Amino acid sequence: MILSKLFYDKCGPSYQKAIDELEKNIAEIEKFDGATKGEKIVLTIYQFSKRYLTPGEYWGYCIRYVKLYFPMYSVNDTYDKLRRDIIKHAYYHMYLNMNWMEKFHWGSNYLKLDDFIHYQRSFCERVLCFPHKYLKFYLRKFQQHATKEPSKKVVKRGEEMLSLYPKIEAAIGDIHEWFQLLLKVDDDKYVKDNVEYRIGQDLHDIKLWKIYMNYLKQSGQFKYLLGIYSKYCRFFLEDDEIKKEYQKAMFEHGPVNLPWKNLFEFEKGCGMEEIVAEEEKYDIQSSFEEDLSPFDKSICRRFYDTYKAYQEFSLPGPLVLYVLNNAGHHVLRKLFASCKYFFAKQSTPICYRLRTGSREIYEDESLTLKEHSTKESFAKNFYITGIMYGGPLLDFLPKFYRCEAKFIRLLGKVRLTFNELLFLIGHGGVIQLNIQSSTIKDEKNESVALEDIMTYLRNVEELCLPNVKITEKTSHALISMKFNSKFDNIDIKSISGAPFDAEEFLEFLSVSCSS
């Protein structure tokens, strides 16, 4: 028997009888060899699925025979078409398999599921709007690949979903609590995808079936509810109470399109008009396909042609200048956008992403330098706000006004003084720091103590350091520090200095590192 005995024993007598007939038919086909064997098995399961809600084991069996009798590299597309048809039918029967996920990357089929999201190939906003175990990775990648300051709304949503995910995972054993946490996501598709995926893994979870149907009633999704009723009644064949409930709902809210061949009388009586839901449309690649326009250097000349040196403001002049001189990059963006005067007085070009590459590129707030670009080629007082990534960027430190980068990775052998390091990390907001190829020395040309560096890294999640010094106070100092997030990775190339308390250091790692 293809179906497990445990699953079979839980089924009602009528459904068991249908399964017995299906298994008998498959066994008869299995006795013979021939070119049409796989096709006959798939067709037999298809015919069953037109009358009954079909467990996932049978869809997996279909795929097995498609692979066996229709080689993937066939000259025609028979394999691919048949495979897509099987996946489509399995999806309707609320069964999904990790190996089928290329079918659900884009468009209206895009699934908001925990185990499936890592197949996503682009770091777009859509993967940040719901909880899943890869969310932190995608949120950080999204921030690192952006060419300008990401939307506060998007990042905030991502952080909120990041904090909600472990609560959902912890409640997996309590159906009611788990479902209530799904509702907190405030995303109907997320609720549907996760509930139906879970039901598809265990069709016998009658408690979840009823919670889900009640949710669809309360949210007024009656057309969709009728489809769920139809699936339920083709698995729990003896549940006359739900069937009566379904019949009443059909007369009140029908018609709705159904694919079943064994329609109930009340389903036939509704006229069965086809209801076609309008598909969501996504243009994932559009943001990556725009051509980069060359930087127009005449912009700088035209700027001063229209600049007015003397202007009146509601606030006194000294106060305006004080705000301007002390503003962070968020305020500066607004001031620069409101009036050219402010940029003329505080000429600090805001650069969200600074990196090195094969050519010089300006895009939004992103600046790419060649490794051998000259310092004279670029404006002074760059304000770095997001990412520093690449080769000899420290050569340009004299050109920086301020650095508040959250993601820093310096490539190549760079000699850093502690003061230069503080210029990069002193703002305290660094999330990822990778300077493992560098060396860090203090004013005495000695390695810097680890605790002196960690003082400025309370938000760090990934840390790769070169040479550091350990003191007798290191482990105690680290334990006493309060970090705002757990480490995903710590990698220190070499240590030197006095012996330290290894047990206390291990205690620090166990508390501060994520599992």
Image (spheres, grey):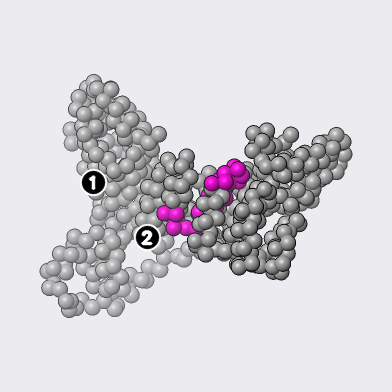
90 or 17, which is in the foreground?
Answer: 17
Residue, far top: 499
Residue type pointed to by label 2: Lys
In the drawing, does residue 228 fall left or right of residue 324?
A: right
Residue sitting at 37 percent across and 51 percent down? 159
Q: Is residue 287 visible?
A: no
Query: Residue 420, image x and y in percent?
Result: 24, 44
Q: Is residue 185 magenta?
A: yes
In the drawing, does residue 167 fall left or right of residue 8?
A: left
Q: How many marks?
A: 2
Residue type pointed to by label 1: Gly
Q: Earlier in the sequence, mark 2 or mark 1?
A: 2
Q: Vertical placement of 332 versus 145: above or below? A: below
Q: Residues within 10 Å of mark 2 (few under 14, many from 20)?
A: few
In the drawing, does residue 54 fall left or right of residue 157?
A: right
Which of the image's four quarters has the N terminus? top right
124 or 207, which is in the foreground?
Answer: 207
Q: Is residue 447 magenta?
A: no
Residue sitting at 79 percent across and 41 percent down? 21
Tell me the chief SS of the magenta region.
helix
194 or 63, which is in the foreground?
Answer: 194
Q: Can you tell which mark lies on residue 192?
A: none
Q: Vertical placement of 221 versus 313: above or below? A: above
The residue wearing badge 1 is: 426
The residue wearing badge 2 is: 153
Q: Is residue 300 visible?
A: yes
* Inter-mark Cα distance, 2 to 1: 26 Å
- Please provide the residue range marked out in magenta: 183-207
Quadrant in the picture for residue 55:
top right
